[in-house]
Image (cartoon, grey):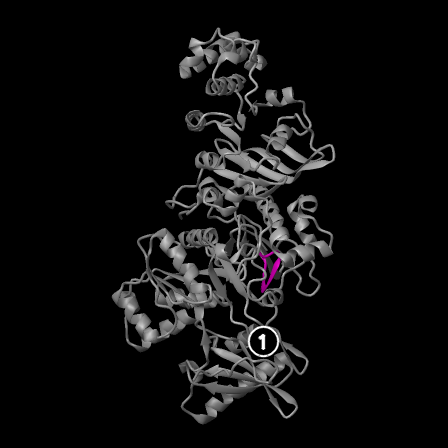
Amino acid sequence: MGGKPSMLLPLIEKIMLTVKSIHTYYGNIHALKGVSLHVRRGEIVTLVGANGAGKSTLVNTICGMEKPARGQIEFNGEPIEGLMPENIVGKGIALVPEGRQIFSAMTVEANLLMGGFVHRNNREQVRADMDRFFGRFPILKDRRHQLAGTLSGGEQQMLAISRALMSRPQLLVLDEPSMGLAPLMVKLILSIIRELKDEGRTILLIEQNARAALKIADRGYVLETGKVVLQGEGQELLEHREVKRAYLGKGAKQIWEA
Amino acid sequence: MSFWEPKNECMSRDELRQVQLERLQATLNRVCRNVSFYGKKFKEINFRPEDDLTEIKDIERLPFTTSRDISDSYPYEMFAVPLREVVRVHSSSGSTTNPRVVGYTAQDLRTWSNLVARILTSSGITRDDVMQITYGYGLLTGGLGIHYGAERIGASVLPTSVGRTERQIKIMQDFRTTVLVCTPTYALVIADRIEAMGIDTKKLSLRYCICAGEPWTEEMRAEIERRLFVKATDNYGVSEVMGPGIAGECLEQSGMHLQEDHFIAEIIDPETLRVLGPGEEGELVLTAITREAFPVIRYRTGDVCSIIEEPCQCGRSMRRISRILRRCDEMIVIKGINIIPNLIGEILQEIKGERPVFQLVAVREGHEDKLEIWVEVTEQLFYDKMREQKALVELMCRKVANFIGITPRIKLVEKGSLKREEGRVKPFADWRGLSDLEPPLKH
């Protein structure tokens, strides 16, 4: 919060993603209950909460895998709720799904080519992008002809992120990128995410590891049983009692203590 | 013109509306669960925040919170977090009711300091300033609220607190105060005393005067600026909502910017409770959307003003409120007649061109209520000749009687003798035994 007073009128980045009062059901389960959030261009925004709080439902709703019953989603001012997933990728949103979901029976290179599918008519661009990711993650280059399923968890995550970036998205959505990774790998993946931000990318980061996510996020939202109960700057939320509670998954009712 | 948090103070109206919606939803989700007062009220009208709050406008379905509601929740019933999360408690003085007790979490205090820092920065204050804060430090919010914001921007703070005017002036001279924080009337008391002490005001280092705490006028501003050689800005705070930091003027001096990313403001008709349109004058209603310990929903402030929709020259996107014109609940009823102290003030001002410090006192004689107006004497109101003095009192009496329809009794009292609270004379004291308000003289 705050900082040095500035004499200049600030350059304020536009809102890229706006989610307004979204409701999504899984059968009879009311999984998202009036959730609103927004992401400005160039921001890392994180969504934290316990298991079952509705984080992945929100991701699926934004990326078109689930249809919301009510509410609006706007991307660059254009309504996108209810579009098919592939059209949403076409608009510029790419998802790195939970559990990475790489094509394990295909080579590393083939996985990246799949990521660049929307640009399939521009072979030079796809090739150049792929070379860039190979430069960035030399381990992927070394294993470009290996089946993706033979990579370690951390390597698979690098591949999944690279694959998503092959579509040259404006917004990168990362669903639980640290899940199932060894602590050292978690650190590596988070530092990659921070680098992506420094490159000016816009990121929506969904994480159960609230502490790690809030450390690198500009802002965050805390989801509890399908509702946002808190929002604020990353640093603020990091020290917050209710974040710890949500993170630990203790849904216990507040008990009055004098 | 500089900004403390430019990204937030100048965000687009679209983004602001989205931010308000998100914060309002999160706040309602929390109060519905954690504050039984709201949980019950929402249930009564069958309002489920997650289903029924889709647009900010849906807030109009919610019931108001009154100062009475907060008194009735004395002391901690309306807190939204357990007491161990509360790091500060403030309280207003109650008159006939329980005091209104308000809590702050550590995060609330950070937000508070930050918002006061925004307003101080917008009124020209920087870390190079020396600020003398003459509000009370204690259970009321004025002193500490400004204090934290001042420290936040890194100014040098002199927490002189209220009263002892000559000592205040000595400190102002010796410590080279550049910013005086006070009620507008106290600024004028200081100006008077400086003159009486024979001090050359030009030799002081004063640059700014941060005024708050009571309704005042453009004429008073002009007088403060002329006599103290300062730029004076208006500020607005409500203890039940947060304290100072809710709204404040920038150097354009044309209305107070509401911190709309933290508070949602509405203007209502205090009689019909209908929400009024842009620019209309009515009671200000505030909803705190980032408070953790004490998030009040649709709090009726009792303050009458209007919202200025037009964007300000300074570049902030936050809308402004006009001066607080009056209190809507300070209406006094004597013999069935409604009397607004501020209007009496305007009548008295017309007579000699300056607004005297005065207090309306209701007394009961036998079974009859009488209105007395206790006026502090100034040089302008004082005559050597008894006859002239009498004529003045009669003039005041007649003018007021013409306006309100009952003849008051005017009593001239010694300058500075009316009892002050937070540097401010209460506009009304009731001696009819209807309430426990104290007599107007300090002793």
Residue in the image at 51% along x and 68% along y: B92
Extent of the magenta region: B296-306
Instruction: Specify the amino acid type for callout 1.
Output: Thr
Q: Position of residue B300 (x, y in %)?
A: 61, 62
Residue at mark 1: B96
| Quadrant that contains the N terminus of chain A | top left
Q: Nearer the viewer, residue B364 or A188?
A: A188
> Alpha-carbon neighbours of circle 1 within 10 Å: few (<14), some, or many (≥20)?
few
Specify the quadrant of the image occupied by residue A34: top right
* Residue B275 showing in the rendered view: no
Give the side of residue A82 with respect to residue B114, left or right: right
Specify the quadrant of the image occupied by residue A132: top left
Residue in the image at 48% along x and 27% along y: A201
Residue A180 on the magenta span: no
Q: Position of residue B240 (x, y in %)?
A: 54, 62
Residue B317, compared with residue B144, is above or below; it is above
* Number of numbered discs visible in the structure rendering: 1
Q: Chain of mark 1?
A: B
Residue in the image at 32% along x and 73% along y: B194
Q: Position of residue B342 (x, y in %)?
A: 55, 72
Q: Main secondary structure of the magenta part?
A: strand
Mark 1, secondary structure of its residue: loop
Q: Nearer the viewer, residue B10 or B87?
A: B87
Residue A192, compared with residue B82, is above or below; it is above
Give the side of residue A231 with respect to residue A58, left or right: left
